Amino acid sequence: MPNEFRLENYLARVGYKGPIEADLKTLAALQTAHLDAIPFESLDPFLRRPVLLDLASVQAKLVGENRGGYCFEQNLLFKAALEAVGFEVTGLAGRVRWMSPPDSPLGPKTHMMLKVDLAEGTYLADVGFGACLLDAPLQLKTEIEQTTAMGTYRISQSDGLLWLAAKRQGGWRTMYVFDLQPQIQADYELGNWFTSTNPLVPLVSRLIMERLAGERRFKLVDRALSTEARDGEVVTERTLHSADELREVLRDTFGVTPPVPAEEIFSKTGG
């Protein structure tokens, strides 16, 4: 069947060889492995290529073609993997606030995340928020600081909504706003179309990539490559000056095989 999920292929792609149980330990380990192996990348929206959300296309791209993807692709793949293991998973949607002034109105639902119900409690799992990849599942509890290997996070509640924030060098920064209303595939198709085609959305106008590996967060925005440590502390920064440098970074830092030559991608980042 075209939409059949192949768990063994996914586990090989992310390099996971640990126990497979529907518990918190496995969830956390799978999230870590996924983020290391499958980077966030916006190559398709940036190149004006369609982003397909049927499971066969997502598997072919992120598992079979050595590619990454953005939130809808990443979390649809992760959801399928978790369900294949036996987790109880609900797809949610959020409104991104990372670049929004605090007093600005809420935007559309352009982000996907997951609610995972475990014996240990209910958790938020997300492998696709490219501005600040979440390195571990978070308890769906409000007003407590939750510390992970790469950051400190807090979920608060206001106006009937849940607000996820990350502690940065300059203080708390809201990632996105969400509720617990389950979403269906059609909801994600609409959000995906808007996010991957609207010229005002950053993913369409800029090359954005991010990968979490060990205690480092690698980010590429157009030609600016940076490495961050815990809580967004910048460790290194440099500018890519050629297609050869970009090709090397795609291969060695992000582990991505681009769908077009690096020269074509590099030329578009100069606009």
Image (cartoon, helix red, strand yellow):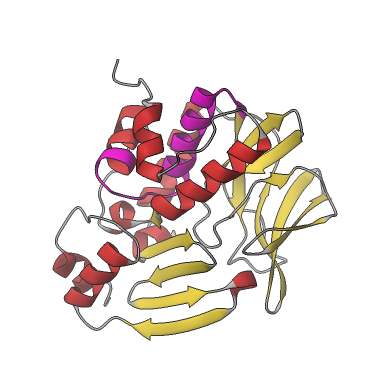
Answer whether residue 81 is magenta in the image.
yes
Q: Nearer the viewer, residue 26 or 64?
A: 26
From the viewer's perspective, is residue 204 above or below residue 53? below
User: Is 64 placed left or right of 136 in the picture?
Assistant: left
Answer whether residue 174 is magenta in the image.
no
User: Is 219 placed left or right of 96 in the picture?
Assistant: left
Q: Nearer the viewer, residue 76 or 21?
A: 21
The image quadrant of residue 109 is top right
On the image, the x and y values in percent for residue 223 come to: 32, 77
Region rendered in magenta: 63-89
Name the residue located 58 percent from the left edge and 55 percent from the top edge.
Answer: 135
Report whether residue 137 is seen: yes
User: Is 86 placed left or right of 212 in the picture?
Assistant: right
User: Which of the image's four quarters has the C terminus?
Assistant: bottom left
From the viewer's perspective, is residue 84 above or below residue 24? above
Name the residue located 52 percent from the left edge and 42 percent from the top edge.
Answer: 30
Query: Furthest-top residue in view?
Result: 1
On the image, the x and y values in percent for residue 191 come to: 48, 41
The number of numbered discs placed on residues in the rendered structure image is: 0
Name the residue located 26 percent from the left edge and 39 percent from the top edge.
Answer: 64
User: Which of the image's four quarters has the N terminus?
Assistant: top left
Report whether residue 54 is seen: no
On the image, the x and y values in percent for residue 128 come to: 50, 49
On the image, the x and y values in percent for residue 211 come to: 44, 60
User: Is 121 placed left or right of 81 in the picture?
Assistant: right
Q: Nearer the viewer, residue 227 or 155?
A: 227
Q: Main secondary structure of the magenta part?
A: helix
Query: Furthest-front residue in view?
Result: 18
